[in-house]
């Protein structure tokens, strides 16, 4: 029998939540388990669409046209078996949103779930979630930006819910809005039967974000292809402490391609050398990083400190930005696109929103649009939401051949019409690596395969001591590149290109 799961333990707030004085409110908190008594006694649930049942408008229902994949059914089963807590680590494009909404639908059917609260890192994800929620019969309140636009609506619906005049409320908000007084003041009125979903939940591990998460909500679900926070073990742990540990099955990029959740792809590494000036700066930064790492490894335990990451992070960031904005990438881009003027649906990834990446974005736009005549526009965090929708439309129908983007396209944005990507800037952050590549592999009608061009900087010749630092820093990143190359349809060709990097650093064992 497919899609069956058991609830062996009650859902609710666990004793571990009382640590570190997490309950700061002065109203009574009631665990959710009392609402599961009847349902749990039946022993099993079925993951189904609820076909044939009448669901009132605004209440969650799996659409008849959506067929959950087996890994989604298993993820749902394991979340229920884990007391309504857990983190789903699933590849970009593998259907995390649908899985979360299916969980909400099941909770509504089985225990009468009353509120779904979705928390997103960015504004554009709020509108994207709204579109998906509407497919599930929901009528969401978009609680972000101007508080006057939504607070009255939320207050009214909460009153209607408690008075029995309304059955269900869906609230979609941003991390910033969740932290604001406008929403924090309302959270105390959310009923016990509330599910909170943290989308791209790694962003919620930061201390200020984690402190804003409501402790009176017992049902919790985190979604992320990369829940582990980069250079932040404490933040990662606090995320898992709140939402729950990673649940099986983890759904990797390889799994997603094999099960046709993502498309196949061609991968072309483009090797780029630094200029002399860039090389000098790079060597200086790498030596400074090496000294901090040496001190941390030698003395951290002896002196009782955990790490010098506060000193290390700025240096790693400076070095990543230097690599991301390397001048020779612009020459490589011009040479590449001269041969690809007839292509379309191409995404050009620049840096992380820093001054260097903004300059790169302008330079890339000039090369493509002014010099070569390739029809492009920019897509950044500053682009207004209505303009973004228009850009999406122009991109999907081919009016625009390409979009030049920085950071805001790294997480969650769904533009499946992307067929080609040129990645000019990458940090050492594995989350960015996974998000960017997975973004290009989403299925779309007529899209049989994607093509990725990845600009990889070859650092300068280093002395023996600095070379060893570089090898240690590069090992994990190169392992990701090799793994990505191995999954490509042209894996042999891609691996030969990467061999030059492996040889330079003596990392042929990867």
Image (spheres, helix red, strand yellow):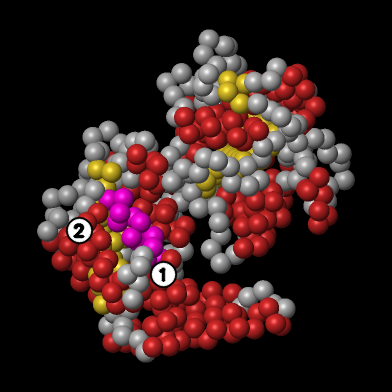
- Looking at the image, which residue is at 30% across and 54% down? 486
Question: Where residue 45 is drawn, which disc sits there?
Answer: none
Q: Which of pointers 2 and 1 lies earlier in the amino acid sequence?
A: 1
Residue 78 falls left or right of residue 478: right
Residue 218: quadrant of the picture: top right
The residue identified by callout 1 is: 475
Residue 140 visible in the shown view: no
The residue identified by callout 2 is: 493
- Looking at the image, which residue is at 62% across and 63% down? 233
Q: Residues within 10 Å of mark 1 (few under 14, many from 20)?
A: some
Q: Residues within 10 Å of mark 2 (few under 14, many from 20)?
A: some
| Labels 2 & 1 near each other (Cβ < 8 A) | no
Q: Is residue 419 above or below residue 370?
A: above
The residue lying toward the viewer, choosing from 199 and 428, is 428
Give the Cα separation between the discs numbered 2 and 1.
21 Å
The residue lying furthest to the front in this view is: 509
Question: In the rendering, at what x and y percent does residue 189 appear?
Answer: 77, 37
Element marked by disc 1: helix
Residue 68 lies in magenta, yes or no?
A: no
Residue 299 falls left or right of residue 193: left
The residue lying toward the viewer, choosing from 153 and 345, is 345
Residue 180 falls left or right of residue 127: right
Element marked by disc 2: helix
Tell me which segment is drawn in magenta.
Answer: 477-488
Residue 454: quadrant of the picture: bottom left
Considering the whole magenta stretch, tell me its main secondary structure: helix
């Amino acid at each position: 029998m497919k899609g069956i799961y058991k609830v062996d333990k009650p859902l609710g707030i666990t004793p571990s939540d009382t640590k570190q004085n997490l309950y700061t409110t002065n109203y009574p908190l009631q665990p959710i388990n009392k609402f599961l008594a009847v349902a749990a006694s039946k022993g099993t649930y079925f993951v189904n669409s609820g076909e044939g049942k009448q669901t009132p408008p605004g209440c969650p229902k799996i659409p008849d046209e959506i067929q959950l994949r087996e890994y989604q059914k298993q993820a749902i089963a394991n979340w229920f078996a884990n007391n309504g807590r857990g983190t789903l680590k699933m590849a970009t494009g593998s259907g995390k949103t649908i899985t979360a909404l299916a969980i909400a639908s099941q909770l509504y059917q089985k225990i009468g779930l009353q509120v779904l609260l979705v928390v997103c890192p960015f504004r554009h994800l709020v509108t994207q979630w709204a579109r998906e929620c509407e497919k599930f019969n929901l009528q969401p309140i978009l609680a972000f930006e101007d508080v006057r636009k939504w607070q009255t609506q939320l207050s009214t619906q909460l009153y209607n819910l408690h008075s029995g005049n309304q059955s269900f409320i869906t609230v979609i908000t941003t991390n910033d809005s969740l932290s604001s007084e406008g929403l924090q003041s309302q959270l105390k009125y959310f009923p016990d039967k509330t599910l909170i979903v943290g989308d791209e939940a790694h962003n919620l591990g930061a201390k200020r974000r984690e402190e804003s998460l409501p402790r009176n909500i017992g049902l919790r679900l985190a979604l992320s292809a990369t829940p582990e926070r980069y250079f932040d073990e404490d933040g990662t742990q606090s995320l898992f402490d709140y939402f729950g540990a990673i649940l099986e099955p983890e759904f990797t990029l390889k799994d997603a391609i094999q099960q046709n959740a993502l498309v196949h792809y061609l991968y072309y590494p483009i090797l780029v050398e630094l200029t002399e000036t860039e090389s000098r700066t790079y060597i200086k930064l790498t030596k400074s990083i090496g000294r901090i790492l040496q001190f941390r490894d030698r003395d951290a335990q002896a002196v009782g400190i955990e790490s010098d990451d506060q000193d290390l992070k700025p240096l790693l960031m400076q070095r990543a930005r230097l690599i991301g904005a390397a001048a020779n990438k612009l020459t490589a881009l011009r040479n590449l696109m001269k041969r690809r003027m007839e292509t379309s649906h191409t995404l050009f990834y620049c840096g992380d929103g820093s001054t260097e990446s903004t300059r790169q974005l302008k330079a890339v736009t000039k090369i493509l649009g002014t010099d070569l005549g390739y029809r492009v526009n920019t897509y950044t965090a500053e682009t207004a939401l209505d303009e973004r929708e228009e850009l999406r439309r122009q991109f999907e129908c081919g009016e625009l051949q390409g979009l030049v983007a920085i950071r805001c396209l790294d997480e969650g944005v769904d533009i499946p019409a992307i067929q080609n990507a040129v990645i000019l800037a990458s940090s050492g952050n594995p989350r960015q690596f996974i998000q960017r590549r997975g973004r290009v592999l989403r299925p779309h009608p007529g899209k049989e395969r994607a093509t990725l061009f990845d600009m990889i900087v070859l650092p300068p010749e280093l002395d023996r001591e600095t070379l060893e630092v570089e090898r240690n820093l590069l090992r994990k990143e190169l392992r990701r590149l090799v793994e990505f190359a191995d999954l490509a349809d042209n894996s042999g060709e891609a691996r030969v290109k990467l061999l030059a990097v492996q040889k330079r650093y003596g990392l042929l064992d990867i």
